[in-house]
Image (cartoon, rainbow, N blue to C red):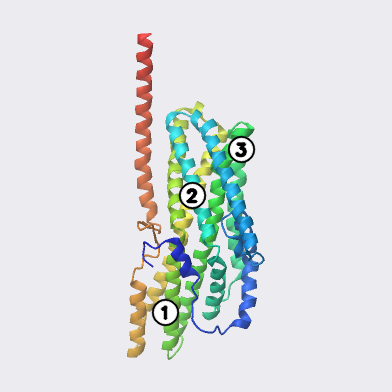
Amino acid sequence: MRSSEKPATAGARLKASPREGPFPFEPQYAERNKELHRTLFWLLLISVSTNTAPITILPCCPNRFYRVVHLSWMILWYGSFVVGSYWEFVLVTTQRVSLDRYLYAIESAIYVVHILSIMLLTWQCRNWAPKLMTNIVRSDLDRAYTIDCGRTKGFIWLQLFLVGIFACLAIFFNIWTQNCVVYRSILSINSYVMPNIISSISFVQYYLLLQGIAWRQRQLTENLERELTHLHSPRISEVQKIRMHHADLIDFTKVVNRTFQYSILLLFVGCFLNFNLVLFLVYQGIENPSMADFAKWVCMLLWLAMHVGKVCSILHFNQIIQNEHSRCLTLLSRVSCSRKDLQDTITHFIVQMRTNVRQHVVCGVINLDRKFLTTLLVASADFFIFLLQYDVTYEALSKSVQGNVTRYK
């Protein structure tokens, strides 16, 4: 897929059937499909409720009536969110000092756009999301991969537990920092806490897809190692089959990242701005301790941890796929054999693995690996210096203007 491909095209590829012709595992397919839905049930239900997944992904809601109900709920929820964000800007944000006012307003606007992009993606995938579930089951049967339901459920509940902990703490400290003023607390929770909860639930799906790809890559590498090192006469057909499955997983990784690319970009921008805003507020609190109290300090640390965690999670799950890719390539590079046909197959496999198809690149510029953290830290340092310079300049100009006004009175 080219880097200019749109998410809608990516969706068309996701719903494409992995193999043509009759499917040889139909008796097992129905049972595996039910097992997958039971494993993902709570994640799917929460995702549908928060408008981060289409209602058609639930096996009991396939018809048009449920689509209309879900669309109405999405429109109602998003309309309420936008209205709440507007009144938060009018009643709360405009009362802040100059620099804080601009940063909070920009952050709120990014959240409005980000939630809109998530809901548009949800609506676009209403047709191919159920087919994606079907094709995952079919592909797993084809490569003889058995889903570890306990491990998958554990992964999902860990991610949802972290989201729940953040939601409870963020709501509690938000009410505390607003001095329990009801309307300010509700508006602030609507504008800043809820968008982060929604995006976090959306990215749980993203993490699960990437982690699932890494698990499947690991099993393929183990199968390849067993075929090449533990058998006296490796079967070319099996090596070719493993090579094709690796190619499918690389392609699927690229499709997943392209589908989530705009959400990833908006999340990075929002996290970048909020991270620097919190750092700036920490600096102001250290410089003038009377400006900060215990609740605000804890709240700032919570937001710092949440934003750093989001960025690191995206890079981490992409990195583990790259690590599995490197592990397979290392295994192939150590193989030496006398059979020319097998050596040609392994050489072809190595060339395939070394070909960079940019499966971890989003929006054409962001390479999702841990090295990207260095880029973010450098950019954050530059932006923080700009904020300090702006704050000092603004304070000096304000004092100068006040002095001139006092002199001419």
Location of residue 399 by image quarter = top left
Q: Residue at x 55, y 35 (%)?
A: 87
* Residue 64 image position (x, y, % from top left): 62, 63
Q: Residue at x 55, y 83 (%)?
A: 23
| 265 is higher (above) or lower (below) than 156 | above
- Distance of mark 2 from mark 1, alpha carbons? 37 Å
Which of the two labelled residues, at mark 2 and mark 1, occupies the earlier sequence position?
Answer: 2
* Residue 106 image position (x, y, % from top left): 44, 40
Residue under label 2:
114
Which of the two labelled residues, at mark 2 and mark 3, occupies the earlier sequence position?
Answer: 2
Q: Please indicate, yes or no, whether residue 109 appears anywhere in the rendered image.
A: yes
Label 2 or label 1, whichever lies nearer to me, is: 2
Instruction: Report helix, strand or loop for mark 3.
Output: helix
**Front position in the image: 224 or 258:** 258
Q: The N terminus is located in which quarter? A: bottom left
**Front position in the image: 177 or 48:** 48
**Front position in the image: 59 or 284:** 59
- Distance of mark 1 from mark 3, alpha carbons? 54 Å
Location of residue 155 by image quarter = bottom right
- Distance of mark 2 from mark 3, alpha carbons? 20 Å
Location of residue 70 by image quarter = bottom right
Residue found farthest to the right: 60
* Residue 407 image position (x, y, % from top left): 35, 10
Amino acid type, residue under disc 1 in the picture: Arg
- Say left or right for 72 vs 250: right
Circle number at residue 243: 1
Amino acid type, residue under disc 2 in the picture: His
